[in-house]
Amino acid sequence: MINVKIIYSLKGDCMKKVISGNKIIVISIPIIIILLLIIFPYFFPKKYAILTYHEFTSGIPKNNMQKNVDEFKKEMKYLRDHHYKTLTLKDVECYMDKKCELPRKSVLITFDDGWKNAYELAFPILKEYNFNATLFYLGENIDRTNSDFISKDELEIINKDYPNIEIASHTYQNHFEEAYNKSEEELEEDFKMMENVVDTKYFAYPYGRYSDNYIKVLKKNNYKLAFAFGGDIEYRKFDNKDNRYLIPRYSFSTTYPYWKFVLRMYMPF
């Protein structure tokens, strides 16, 4: 039998592993730290980020909800380079039903309201990377002459030219902060109006604000999932233990720098 004695000692920025007093293997402490950082997320249960975007610009953002398109492309490139699976709403529904599992590196990309600059600037980037995404569309914009929003004709173009982008509901005309205080009957009327715009069973609350009445109407109309964020709603990743009508999202706007995006994707919660 060979008696092997192992001794660990620290010297400078290296760790020495001495075997039988003769053979020395030097392991750099920075390498050990990098290895620990790589495996750190795997000590936690799988959770998934939902990214939310609103407006885009090719110049300097004019408000907190705008995103510079070059920054957006940088974030999408990060997802591509790190081999993230971009989810569909059906993927999320299947996972919430506990009928299927998702890869640890999975993400749902969403856009709220239906800003034309998202269609013009961000959607081509999604197409370039062959990414799935969801547009939560504000229904009343379909009848507006406001050129800031995606029109009926442009929705048809999206369905044709961007098959990886799904259209879902962001209400028809309840896009204001106190909409969650509306009665069940008023919310029901809005849902019926939205049926004339898009056929969907997925919903995002305006401003992330919800109520018991909202959830009652969602269930009554057989909606499968509903998404919240912002305000007094906690920003965090989700898993299939979450309430399917209160799935949390992150809002990635001007105030969310690239380093914070990378950190948020890395952190397991």
Image (cartoon, rainbow, N blue to C red):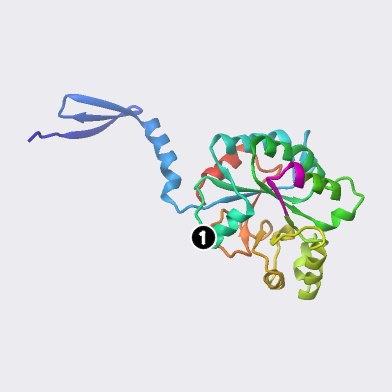
- Pinpoint residue 99: horizontal percent, then vertical percent: 51, 60
The residue at which mark 1 appears reads as 99
Q: Quadrant of residue 216?
A: bottom right
Q: Is residue 262 magenta?
A: no
In the rendered image, the residue lying farthest to the right is: 145
Q: Is residue 51 left or right of residue 167?
A: left
Frontmost residue, 59 versus 103: 103
Frontmost residue, 194 versus 43: 194
Rendered view: 208 above or below 7 = below
Q: Which residues are magenta?
A: 159-167
- Pinpoint residue 220: horizontal percent, then vertical percent: 70, 73
- Pinpoint residue 225: horizontal percent, then vertical percent: 64, 62
- Where the N terminus falls, by quadrant? top left
* Residue at 58%, 39% in the rendered image: 79
Q: Is residue 229 left or right of residue 5?
A: right
Q: Is residue 160 magenta?
A: yes
In the rendered image, the residue lying farthest to the left is: 1
Q: Quadrant of residue 128?
A: top right
Frontmost residue, 9 versus 200: 200
Q: Quadrant of residue 248?
A: bottom right
Q: Dot 1 lies on which element?
A: loop
Mark 1 nearby-residue class (10 Å; few <14, some 14–19, many ≥20): few
Q: Is residue 263 left or right of residue 206?
A: left
Residue 174 in sight? no
